[in-house]
Image (spheres, rainbow, N blue to C red):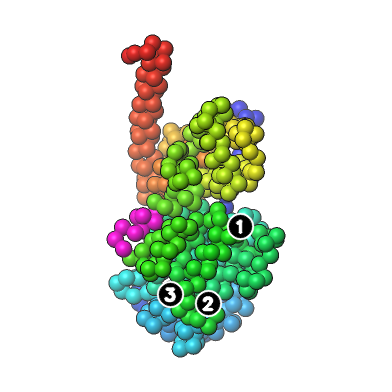
Amino acid sequence: MNDLKEFKFKPRVINPVKITNASIFSADEDVRKTINTFKENMPWIHVDIVKDPISASNYKFDNASVFIFDDTAMTIVDTTKIKKNNNNTILALLSSNGFIHYSPPSISRERFPYTANSDLVFAVDKREYPPDHIIAAVVRCAEDRLNIEKYSKERRFIFLIVDDEPRWFSQFLPVLYNIIGQRADIMVTRTYEETLKFIFGVEHESEIDEKSYLSHGHGDDVVCIITDIFFPKGNNLKSDAGKDLINLINKYYRRIPIIVASKAKVAEDLKNISFIMPKGDPGSLQTLKNYIHNFTGMGDFLIRSKSGEELYRFKNIREMYETVLKAEKNTNEAKKLRELLEIYGQKDWFSTWLYMHGYKELGDKLRPRQAKGHHLVKILKNHLKREIQRMNYTPLIIDKNKIFNLDDLLNVLRTVDPCKIQKFSDNDLFSTWLDHQGYPELAEELRPIHNKGAILGKILSDIVEKWIKIYKSREKGDIERRIITSKIEETGYL
């Protein structure tokens, strides 16, 4: 390869600040045992088990950190001192108190004041929410919150979870993080006012400025909202605030997919403007996964008719480019496709999908597009064509080894010192590059794999080897189909 033709691969890093330290102070043995989960799944984090409240209160970390407490520990540590000593830290309470599991924040704070000292509250028990099952989500949620609140200079992609009961999001977050990997952040809000502040940057609905609301709050960063119907609004702890929230989002941010996680009958009234996911129903999480992949840029790009019928589906920008070319024609079908492309451009769906699949610069160029008709088609075609041409000259570099294709990747995984590939797996860089190169299924299987040493290298190389065979088989089949199609077009028969 000629170095002059190469382009630097620029992965989108959603969290510039990484949590590298954790302190656990807990009387609950199961919480303390999560140190084993840290070692296995989060080896980049240094973990200390603290044995007394004075030591816990005096802990100082130079880097970003998370402090993990149970109910007993939270009542006896000096959280104010911890916050003062640690500039970049999040305090997480892993509560085994059933009352806290089911209660909105104001009720929990009234009965158990120590809950007010934590930044995040999660439910734990021995059956539904074992600490070792949720601890990775706890740390990631802490890291997301820290970065969203303090390091939000670049545009983010945020899944907003709105629910007042820790028991539900403690069960749900591990599932959601497995779906999104390192492609987006998650933010949890528990009241209507907290949610309003996060999205619009205001205390009351009347303060939303219809002309400048995009420049306030984090609404422009939200790619999906998953909300309950009933959560606190003002003094009404059981209000149907979810309805008010959904109506606001539908008014100001119609591009944002809304998932209503509720079994309440009132949710059915919202099915025309949101996706209804009954909590706890068999198969609901798989249905949710499919919805997230199809509507938030995580999976295939879908083009639907105005009535919701699926018309086009593609996995990579080569297929996207081929679809855009169809819109160049002067036919009724092409005209309808151009109209749909205009809607997708205006709603920022192109750039969202491109960001999620590793095309940061292209996503920036296409965000948002207000062009119409053939002019829009020309813009999309030119940008996509240029990116497709660049893809073959955009290597992933590991320990000075330049990787241009799957065979190169497999060779490096088999021969390079495993410690050299650790960060590529931990930070989703393999998946981002593979998405960028047009291998979304392989990217999905590698997102995320946390391990270390020779075991990590073997896991990764085995998966890559498996998919090389699959892709070569597909390529052979595609060539045979093109030959058959060409013969039919030339002669009218096989």
Residue at 56% in and 26% down:
330
Q: How far apart are marks 3 and 1 (CA)?
A: 26 Å
Judge the density around disc 2: few (<14), some (14-19), many (≥20) Cα neighbours within 10 Å.
some
N-terminal label among 1 and 2:
1
Quarter of the rendering containing residue 464: top left
Looking at the rendered structure, the kind of residue marked 1 is Asp
Mark 1 or mark 2, whichever is nearer to me: 2
Residue at 58% in and 57% down:
253
- The residues colored magenta run 281-289
Which image quarter is the N terminus in?
Answer: top right
Q: Would you say the residues marked 1 and 2 are in contact, meaning their CB atoms lie under 8 Å apart?
A: no
Looking at the rendered structure, the kind of residue marked 2 is Lys
In the structure shown, which secondary structural element does the residue marked by tag 2 occupy?
A: loop
Judge from the rendering whether residue 211 lies leftward or rightward of residue 316; answer left or right.
right
Q: Does the magenta stretch include residue 466?
A: no
Q: Is residue 282 magenta?
A: yes
Give the residue at mark 2.
233
Choose between 363 and 343: the one closer to the eye. Answer: 343
Which numbered marker is on residue 165? 3
Q: Distance between the residues labelled 1 and 2?
A: 23 Å
Choose between 233 and 154: the one closer to the eye. Answer: 233
Which numbered marker is on residue 220? 1
